[in-house]
Amino acid sequence: MKPRYLMPLFPLLVLSGAVQAQSPLPRPGFLQAQPAAFEANWTPLKMPTGERIALLGASYLVAMNEDWGVGPSFYGSAKGNFGGIFTVGFTAQRRWRLGSSTHAAAGLYAGAGGGLSSDKVRFGGGLMLRPELSLRTEFGSWYSGVSLAHTAFPNGRGNVRGTSLGLVLGYSDGFFSYAPGDAGRRVQNTRRSGLGVDEVSLSVGSYKPRSGARNRSGAPAQRMGKAGAVLRQYVTEGAWWGMEAAGAASGGADGYMEVLATMGQDYGLGGPNLRAGWHVATGLGGGGDVDTGNGWLVKGGPTLRWKSPWGPALHLDAGVMGSLTGSFKSTYVRASLGLPLDKATGLFGQPNDEGGVVRTQSVYASLMHLPKVRFKDGHETSVGHLAMVMSRDLGTHLYGTAQAGSAAFGRAGAYSFGLFGLGLQGKPLAGGPRVGAELLVGAAGGGGVAVTGGAIAQGEAWAEWRFGESERLRLRTGIGQWRTLRGQTQSSPLVNVSLGYAFGALSR
């Protein structure tokens, strides 16, 4: 039976045969492909005040079997005057074939976040649920259609909810990966694997608002420090595109967050290692009392990149940015450390004969409980977080990890965070779990939580169990400590439970 999940429909497959026979390098197994799709949707929503907004959503869904797909999703305000509403979570979707070029889908998104709130607009504990029914028509690898969705922030005192007709646009693709058991082996790379990201850059920078820029409260906008990350895929040696996300880490704008699509081009300066060029980006941002209007941001400027002989790269970029409808206008500067991830293919994705080493990468849905969190009004209570966690093995015992999430339970709706760091892990115990520990730093704020400036840190010790013949499914439990890093610091113990999916991808 052919899989019905994505159109054009194709079965799970392996890349071996002639490729394996011609390979000058040992192949540890098979490069497996699962149907996958990028999907965007537009959801109108009426706020409790009567104002109308719209949420722009994006999902990456990977087929788990013939009918079901699961993957991470993101929603942000893209219309109205509520820029800064963000949620991050996961979507599960079921599809049915109705005709040769038509299918129906039912999905459920569960995420966490919020945004600009008041006595009339409340996001409760931060949990967002969005069930959806949709009808789609396919044209080649693309599909589009109409949807009926109900959006709600149901817990706590949340009152943001509504049912509306929307639009959906998708692109069918494939998710290529190696089995986690192939980790550490060298193979020839015939194409990008895993998430297809060539480089992740960890960045710090600052915004210096122009004169006249004001916050939503009417006060002059202040200089803001930020921390974040950029994911890049290089189309050629000097041309790239990707995604970037950052949050306020200093300057009293805790709760500000931005998520942007970006692209750029640079050129060699008399040699292969030092390059200069340009970059542009657009996307959604807001929160932290920053006036971004409907949420749309644009930015651009010059870049400088130094490629080290050891693999990592240093990026320096500057420029101007601003909101399309709000008063926020600023110059900025940012420095980044780029770490190679995927074993890059040749120009325009052509095979590269150098080969690479398979490393395990995992994506988790994480539920975290903090029993003692202090709010700006002096009250202390428990808070529950929902987060997306990504980890990447950098060697046998060292790994890198990143988290993005928000409060989902308690009274901290609109509190969001982004963290990145390193961890150490042992080998799996015979018949038992694998254990490890990690330390992360990043930015957070919003929801009334007392996070002066926005800088936070988190440490955790964990144990992980593997399931299934391929050992792709992972269950992780951990305990640790969360704390703020500026002003009057606070801390809380934490308990974490995560469900993950692991796969192998090539590294340089």
Image (cartoon, rainbow, N blue to C red):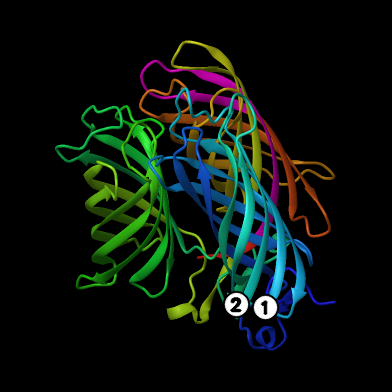
Question: Where's residue 299, x and y in %?
Answer: 28, 54
The residue that appears at 71% across and 61% down in the rendered structure is 105
In magenta segment, residue 65:
no
- In the image, 383 versus 12, the foreground residue is 383
Rendered image quadrant of residue 388: top right
Q: Are marks 2 and 1 in contact (CB under 8 Å)?
A: yes
Numbered disc 2: secondary structure:
loop
For the record, the magenta segment spans 480-503
- In the image, 73 versus 306, the foreground residue is 73
Question: Where's residue 142, x and y in %?
Answer: 58, 74
The residue that appears at 53% across and 42% down in the rendered structure is 87
Outermost residue toward the top in this view: 378
Q: Amino acid at mark 1?
A: Pro
Q: Which residue is mark 2?
A: 141
Describe residue 407's horizontal placement relative to residue 442 as left or right. right
Chief SS of the magenta region? strand
Rendered image quadrant of residue 472: bottom right
One can see residue 452 in this view: yes
Outermost residue toward the front in this view: 50
3D distance between C-alphas at marks 2 and 1: 6 Å
Describe residue 448's horizontal placement relative to residue 141 as left or right. left
Residue 408 position (above or below residue 322): above
Rendered image quadrant of residue 212: top left
- In the image, 133 versus 278, the foreground residue is 133
